[in-house]
Image (cartoon, rainbow, N blue to C red):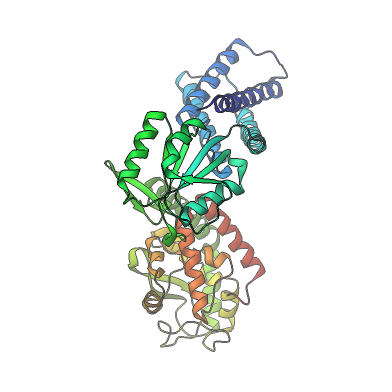
Amino acid sequence: MNSSTHKLRFLFSLGDLTHLNLSFFLSYHYKFDEFQLSDNYVFLLLIFNLSWLVVANLLSLYKIDRLFKLEVIISKIFTAVSIHLLILTAFLFLIKGSIFSREHIVYTFVLIIILLPVWRVFTLFLLKKYRKSGYNSTNIVIVGQNKTAFELHNFFVNDNSKGYRLLSVFLNAESDYKFNCDTFSVDSLESYCVENNVCEIYYTLSYNDSQLMSKLLSFCDRNMVRFRIVPDYSNFKSRKVGYDFYGNLPVITLREEPLQLGFNRFVKRTFDIVFSFLVIVLLLSWMFPILFVLIKLDSRGPFVFKQLRSGLDNNNFHCLKFRTMKTNADSDLKQATQDDDRITKLGEFLRKTSIDEFPQFINVFLGDMSVVGPRPHMLKHTKDFSDSIGNYMVRQLVKPGITGSAQANGFRGEISKFEDIKQRVEYDVWYIENWSFLLDVKLIALTIVNMIKGQSKAR
């Protein structure tokens, strides 16, 4: 770690502590109309700062990552603030700190939640500018002449805000690509790295050349140069590749699944239970008797329509809907189409507003479905689509939802051509690979907006 990185870490930590203490003092002044802290609050301020330093260290909050993502950093800040609040609350409970104002604590953390993210966004903006000016940079070289080497070269050349300074590319054969920097033979790599203070080597060649790899690894270990291997994932560009370690063995996975983590599943299930319970109590409790009468008056048949559909791990479950069609023998074989004569007048309204799906909140409460997830299809469609779309069954890795990424983006209703279902599957797979609680909230909000507007012609 170079001296400028140390200075940046100090700047981030000093800035965070400044805003934390500013929030504490401003809240104290607002609550007590005084600037001078009492002895008790001086003690609380000491604990306040020490606990923050512990949390920040545990979460590596000041690690300088050149490939940082703003949303990840903001998420870590909110996590740190939440843990900090829990620690402070637990401490006050243990010492029975009734002498301290709860309002002051609330005001303090409200200010922190506002000031810290704003401060961090500002500093990251300045850091990008700082690196673009040539500071806090690290010298790197690439070994290889293949497509992977060329794409990596483009990444470093086209974006200098990360602080990488690409000096040269080293080849061990002729290349079909034109590199926008000096190129040399791999035989001169070691002397070049020593003379030019190279910090990192990015190796893109085949693993079959074990002699060259072993030689370069040994050189890097002796000279404190970091050796990065860049595997060729060109066949898997549409996937989010990750890896785990089974003992000392690296195991590559071609799909990230956030809902494989127990904590994420707990968060999602807790939200499903609370949300579905509120809908059942606040909406379905009065909606059921009204629609029972209207549906019965509109046409003969059951009030609620039950249909076997494909669920988690391709297990079947009875999906519930308010009946929108006349009773017919094709309900499990033929999808609803535009101007379908099976749809009743009331059913047309229920479908347009998505009210017909509301009984599925009972499915959610019982655990067969989730509020957000890939829409469950009838068994015939699951069989047909799984035969024609290679990644269709990936949808069954999570619970089906009342709404999903595809539906929130307008892909709902009749499937009139192959491209319709193909795009829906792409949205669903993307959702599985990118799940977050905030994404669920966003998709629910989009769905509510679509319900209010109505979607007469969904894709």
* Residue found at x 45% / y 53%: 273
Residue 78 position (above or below residue 108): below
Q: Residue furthest right?
A: 33
Q: How many marks?
A: 0
Side of 275 where 31 appears, left or right: right
x and y percent of residue 20 in the render? Answer: 61, 25
Going 59% across and 47% down the picture, which residue do you hit? 157
User: Residue at point 39% right, 59% down?
Assistant: 367
- Residue 258's place in the image compared with 228, above or below, is below
Front-most of residues 291 and 275: 275
Residue 434 visible to an observer of this rendering: yes
For the view shown, which residue lies furthest in the left direction? 247
- Decide if residue 206 is on the left or right side of residue 340: left
Residue 390 percent location from the top left of the image = 39, 71
Q: In the picture, which quadrant includes the C terminus? A: bottom right
- Front-lying residue, 323 or 54: 54
In this view, 97 is above or below 168: above
x and y, in percent, of residue 147 in the image: 47, 57
316 sits to left or right of 2: left
In which quarter of the view is residue 228 placed? top left
